[in-house]
Image: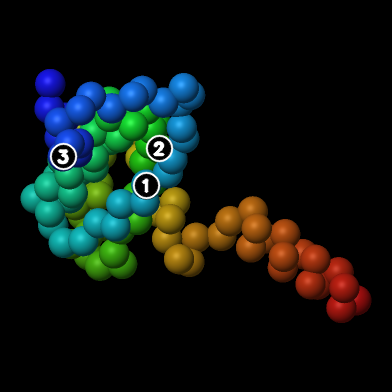
Amino acid sequence: AVHALDISANPPTPPTRTLQGTMVLQLSGELGNHLSSFAYYFAVQTIASTEFNLNLTLHVRKQKSKKANSAARNVQCLKSFRYLDFNECDWDHPTDNNNSSDNNSSNSNG
């Protein structure tokens, strides 16, 4: 069998362990663009899993615009996407690293 990413037509040797990966999906525009981006992600996720034994975790980041916010709310109406946090990867979203560095810098100053 010829595999999608194996141009030599030799069956790939399966990896001995499952690899973990993270994919951040940058969303832009309206609902149709979001759904198209998700379709590409799920295609890549399927290939990564079957061909490379790579388990991808999805994180999403949307634009700061009225259309993007509206589209994110509409996408979450679909059962498959309810678990997604569209603000998780926002540049302005505080993370544990940001909070701890702020706390450390304020402690060192006073």
Residue reaching furthest bottom?
109
Residue reaching furthest right?
110
Disc 1 marks a residue whose amino acid type is: Met
Residue drawn at the location 33% of the way across and 32% of the way down? 52
Disc 2 marks a residue whose amino acid type is: Thr
Query: Can you tell which mark lies on residue 7?
Result: 3
Q: Which of the pair 16/80 is nearer the observer?
A: 16
Q: Quadrant of residue 5?
A: top left
Position in image of residue 102 (x %, y %): 72, 68
Residue drawn at the location 87% of the way across and 73% of the way down? 108
Q: Quadrant of the C terminus?
A: bottom right
Disc 3 marks a residue whose amino acid type is: Ile
Does 57 sit above or below residue 61?
above
Visible in this render: residue 81?
A: no
> Going from the N terminus, do you reach mark 3 or mark 2 first?
3
- In the structure shown, which secondary structural element does the residue marked by tag 2 occupy? strand
Does 103 sit above or below residue 56?
below
Q: Nearer the viewer, mark 3 or mark 2?
A: 3
